[in-house]
Amino acid sequence: MHYTISSILILAVTGFPATMGAPRPQLPICDSSIEYQITSQEDVPGSAMTGDYSVSGASGSGQLTAQTTYSFGTTVEVGADLSLDFGDIVSAGVTGSVSITTETGSTQGVSDTCPKGAWYCALSITPTMVKVSGTRTEYNSCAGPDGGPDPYTILLPKLGADGNPIINAEVCTCKNLVGWADPGHIGLLCPGDCALPPS
């Protein structure tokens, strides 16, 4: 190996050729992780929605037997800025069967009559949700806790034994159509606007 005079001097002082440089220290490899803790869980009613069709009460025999579609999903009440992982939260210890996706389906087994009068009826659909609260903490394997614990609260659709969402469907009076304030109508007003039945 050929060295210049300056290289020989550096080699003599440091023990390394000038072209190699000083050895670099090995830095530890630090991993990041997120831990979810669950502090409470309870079943609560979700936000009610109005079915996608209505019937007239003019004949007194308008049947709400046709399937009515619905769509609802997970809601974040606290911690929307935390990039929550719903699957990891469920794995942290949520009991019972829940969904972490948007549930779309139709009512089953609902059969009721719109009472006779100059009004319209539809279905008010309320899902059963599981309210889960807890904390989210970020960890660094080299430095320990690296953020948090930050509180979160989410609502997850609850599923029944058949794997379908648990919902409650009730006949309601359409408050955006005629006759809704007349005496004799069903006291429950639909939570949203009703669509007119097809002519």
Image (tube, rainbow, N blue to C red):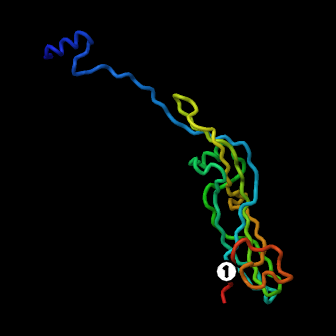
- At 57% across and 39% down in the image, what residue appears? 34
The N terminus, quarter of image: top left
Q: Residue furthest top?
A: 12
- At 58% across and 49% down in the image, what residue appears? 81
Q: Nearer the viewer, residue 126 or 107?
A: 126
- At 76% across and 69% down in the image, what residue appears? 169
Q: Where's residue 159, x and y in %?
A: 70, 58
**101 over 29 or under it: above or below:** below
Residue 46, picture quadrant: bottom right
**In the drawing, does residue 121 fall left or right of residue 16?**
right
Q: Where's residue 8, x and y in %?
A: 18, 12
Count all numbered tags in the image, as a single digit: 1
For mark 1, does the 10 Å Cα neighbourhood hold few (<14), some (14 to 19), or many (20 or more) residues? some
Q: Nearer the viewer, residue 159 or 120?
A: 120
Q: Where's residue 160, x and y in %?
A: 72, 58
Q: Which residue is mark 1?
A: 195
Mark 1, secondary structure of its residue: loop
**In the drawing, does residue 106 fall left or right of residue 63?**
left
Residue 137, picture quadrant: top right
**86 over 148 or under it: above or below:** below
Q: Amino acid at mark 1?
A: Ala
**In the drawing, does residue 13 fall left or right of residue 68?**
left
The C terminus, quarter of image: bottom right
**41 over 21 or under it: above or below:** below
- At 22% across and 9% down in the image, what residue appears? 12
Residue 178, picture quadrant: bottom right
